[in-house]
Amino acid sequence: ESVNLAEMAARASDLYGIERIRLGSLEPVFIDEKKVRLLAENPKLCRQFHIALQSGSNAVLERMNRRYTAEEFLELVSMIRTYMPDSVFTTDMMVGFPGETEEEFCESMAFARKVGFSKIHIFPYSPRKGTAAAKMDNQISKEVKSERAARLSEVAAECERQFFASA
């Protein structure tokens, strides 16, 4: 029997002893409006969503073979906020993916501000043997990745301050 995310959360909330349900490491392509509506009806669901972004640049997302765009990610966040206005969002973002330009990196920083994440987990890209990305041209130097991680950390801290100021 195939069960989707919203159905699984509903089943879990019926179990004895389950008082809170938190969803983490969600992939944007697996969440649609019907699931969001059902999740919004679940009183045990924590209104905190960790949704993998990786990059706010469509060009980088495409090179990563992600199946979503920054605009689709933002639409998902907006949809969740429509049904659950008190929701907060955390994410993972990677810096220094092969070929990432300064402009693409700046797109990611601007996108993080636009979404208004309460927390951003930042990871410098590191090649994994046998992956397509490890064989790509234009690998980013460790120095540039460190510098970008530091700059994105400043944006993350800014977003976090704004989140706590509005809470």
Image (tube, helix red, strand yellow):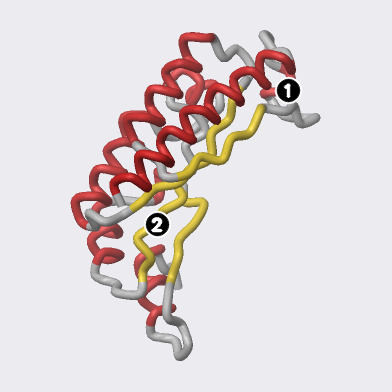
Q: Which residue is mark 2?
A: 48
Residue 8, percent across and down?
A: 42, 71
In this view, the mark in front (1 or 2): 2
User: Real-space Cα distance between discs 1 and 2?
Assistant: 33 Å
Residue occupying the far right of the picture: 129
Circle 2: residue type: Gln
Q: Between 148 and 6, which is closer to the camera in this rendering?
A: 148
Q: Secondary structure at mark 2?
A: strand
N-term-proximal mark, 1 vs 2: 2
Q: Which mark is residue 88?
A: none
Residue occupying the far bottom of the picture: 16
Residue 79, percent across and down?
A: 24, 47
Residue at 63% x, 33% y is: 123
Residue 156 appears left or right of 73: right
Q: Which mark is residue 134?
A: 1
Residue 53, percent across and down?
A: 47, 37
Is the residue 25 above or below the residue 113 in the image?
Answer: below
Q: Between 159 and 141, which is closer to the camera in this rendering?
A: 159
Q: Between 74 and 46, which is closer to the camera in this rendering?
A: 46
Circle 1: residue type: Ala
Circle 1 residues within 10 Å: few <14, some 14–19, many ≥20: some
The quarter of the rendered structure image containing the N terminus is bottom left
Residue at 59% x, 35% y is: 122
Q: Secondary structure at mark 1?
A: helix
Residue at 40% x, 50% y is: 30
Residue occupying the far left of the picture: 82
Count of number-bearing discs:
2
Residue at 26% x, 66% y is: 38
CB-based contact (under 8 Å), mark 1 and mark 2: no
